[in-house]
Amino acid sequence: MRDLTLAPRADAGLRFDLDEMARRATEFESQPASASIRWAYERFEGRVVVAASFQDCVLIDVAVQAVPAIEVVFLDTQYHFAETLWYVDRVRERYDLNLTVMQPLVDRDDLWQIDQNECCAIRKVEPLARALDGKDCWITGLRRTEAATRAKTPIVHLDLGRGLAKVNPLATWTDLDIDGYKTDRELPEHPLKAHGYPSIGCWPCTKPVRDGDDPRSGRWAGTGKTECGLHGWPEPAQNPLPRLGGETA
Ligand code: SF4
């Protein structure tokens, strides 16, 4: 089993021009999301992966318009809703995606009932680590308004735990931005969005929420767990790159 602790690596920044990344992080605050994707693809000579949750296809739509051949990764935890798998097929049809589907190496059927962190490690974190083998950068759909834990998401930063660049092109987008983009681009909607699921993960760990509730409150509801472990980054004091708008931690 790989080391999934994502502890900061002493050599994480050596492969990257941190000044350039910091400068780009600031520049992209006022540029279209496609600019950061195009930059990452060119800067890292294609060694870039888009990690897509398939709750919607906004990030995919932006990414393939910027770089049609870009690789998209879907983590098939084997606990997705049937509606999510249906939606993956619809999105594949629409975009002719360069899609890689990653599955867990270990099958522990009951683990989510016993240890959700370990279950996420086996079904999400480790498969993502395999997908990122040989890459320099990964691109995610994290947005600042999604949760308090994501409020300081930079558009470009060093993922210290993985020793990779990480780009979050939609970091500045609000829910209104997302809705407007879906309408303008006539994007297909995940079927569960109309049934009280604003945030969708695995079926054992996702509940519908009431109007006005925190959209992510249905994820691991009642357990205190708020993140699956894919996006944990070190405390700002350990991260040499800007958190927001050029502010260097
Ligand atoms: S979200 Fe739940 S079922 Fe999915 S990997 Fe994490 S603990 Fe397991």
Image: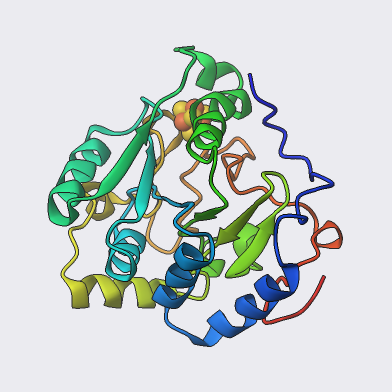
Q: Is residue 153 visible?
A: no
Q: Residue 195: percent from the left, percent from the top?
A: 25, 49
Tell me if residue 134 comes above or below residue 37 in the rendering: above
Instruction: Report the coloring of the rendering.
Output: rainbow
Direction front: furthest residue: 45
Q: Quadrant of residue 103?
A: top left
Give the residue at x 63% y 82%.
Answer: 26
Q: Quadrant of residue 243?
A: bottom right
Query: Observer-nearest residue: 74 or 67?
Result: 67
Query: In this rendering, is residue 76 above or below 232?
Result: above
Q: Quadrant of the C terminus?
A: bottom right
- Depth check: give the residue in front, 116 or 231: 231
Q: Residue at x 32, y 59 (%)?
A: 60
Nearest to the observer: residue 58 or residue 11: 11
Name the one closer to the observer, 21 or 31.
21
Query: Can you see residue 76?
Result: yes
Where residue 180 sits, quadrant-wise, is: bottom left
Residue depicted at x 54% and y 80% = 28
| Relative image position of residue 146 (x, y in whole percent) | 51, 62
Q: Position of residue 175 (x, y in %)?
A: 40, 71
As displayed, is residue 114 above or below residue 55? Answer: above
Task: Establish if 123 lies above or below 32.
Answer: above
Outermost residue on the bottom side: it is 30
**Is residue 170 shown left or right of residue 234?**
left
Q: Residue at x 59, y 84 (%)?
A: 27
Q: Is residue 147 left or right of residue 58?
A: right
| Left or right: residue 236 compared with residue 33 | right
Q: Quadrant of the N terminus?
A: top right
In the drawing, does residue 3 fall left or right of residue 165?
right
Q: Position of residue 90 (x, y in %)?
A: 15, 47
